[in-house]
Amino acid sequence: MLRRDPHLPKKEDDAGESAPLSTSLTTAAAASHSSPLPYRRRCQFLVNDDSFRHRHRFLLPFVLAAIIALYFILVPADFILSNTSNNVKSNHPPILYGHVHMAKTGGTSLNGIIANKFDHVCGHKGYSYDAYNDNEKAKARNGAVVLSGGSVWSRSRVNPRIMSEIGWENCDYISNELDWSFWKQFGNGKFHGVNMELHVPCRDRIEHLMSMCNYEEHGKVGENGLPTKHKIACDAKTDDDLFNSVKKCFLYLNRYDHSLLELFDVKCFSFHNQFTNYIDHMSTILSHRRFESTPYVKRETNDVRNKEEECIWYNPEVREKVDKFLLDTIPYYQFCDSCMGSENEIAT
């Protein structure tokens, strides 16, 4: 039944009574063109009409279905998916972090400790996902673990080919020991549009050189049956002979190159503070693991140095020449010299 709009004026007939309903509706229709009342009020008699709602009660689901269908037809699918994925909560930092593992800078222990403390760490010397059990096994051996070189792989020394097969999509922190070109795949946001910040450890040049000299030469054995190690020719007749003996100690200094500065924000950190200040810094960025195996068992890759057998400490002139040679010729040492003490040093 049509109901009269209470806002419409009554029309009295000759007898003084209200006009029939049909007359009221005619008046309402005419008033719809001239009445100053809002549109909502003028059409209220239709909204409140039970018969109208009954006749059209099935229309609303079809109208909604048509609107949804048009949305998926007209809006690109990649736009819908990207906006859906952006609403998913993520614990990942906004950028990736890369540890340029320079040989003989404590990187093996640093990689292992960070993988044991934090999630989403992917390193040549350890991944987060199995770091707990790997360290528990090391603890069961009652001593430090010696990592062999060559082609011997383990959970503490992951095959680079396997690392590449796994991929880097679930990594927040990557530690690797390949030459600098490895990092190019992440440069300038190439990796899924995510930028990367590189961290380079810096150590006193002469100390670093002597640690490299102390590294065993694989496959070479001296007269005493022990692996041979290089020595600096402090008594060399010429500077060329001295510098040639220095170059024989070099280990993978090509892991850094100034070309990285064109692709990344490159930061430095102190060799001496890496297990304190640097780890504290990363703890504010990376997600902590639910369980951590403690204490961490150090993975050894070098014998303990005997500084008394290193002639360079007793020859200040030789030490000064060698230090200048390292700074003048090696990009890695040039970077550390300019970075340490600058705003790019990770000091806290």
Image (spheres, rainbow, N blue to C red):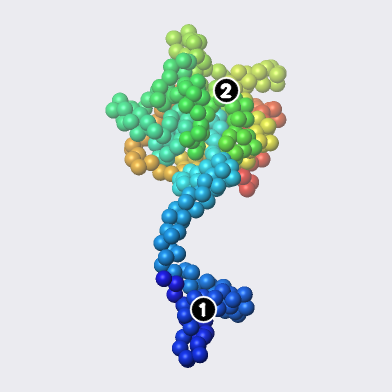
Where is residue 260 shown, x and y percent of the image? 65, 33
Counting from the top left corner in percent of width and height, residue 306 is at 47, 25
To which residue does mark 1 refer? Answer: 23
Question: Crowdedness of circle 1 by 10 Å Cα count: few (<14), some, many (20+)?
Answer: few
Q: Amino acid at mark 1?
A: Thr
Front residue (pair 10, 37): 10
Identify the amino acid type marked 2. Leu
Q: Nearer the viewer, mark 2 or mark 1?
A: 1
Task: Give 248 or 164, whichever is nearer the viewer.
Answer: 164
| SS category of the residue bearing label 2 | loop
* Residue 233 in view, yes or no: no
Please say if the residues under marks 2 and 1 sit with CB atoms less than 8 Å apart. no
Q: Residue at x 45, y 88 (%)?
A: 17
- Up the image or down, 225 lies above or below 248; here it is above
Which residue bears the numbered disc 2? 251
Q: For the point 41% across and 71% down, which residue is it?
A: 1
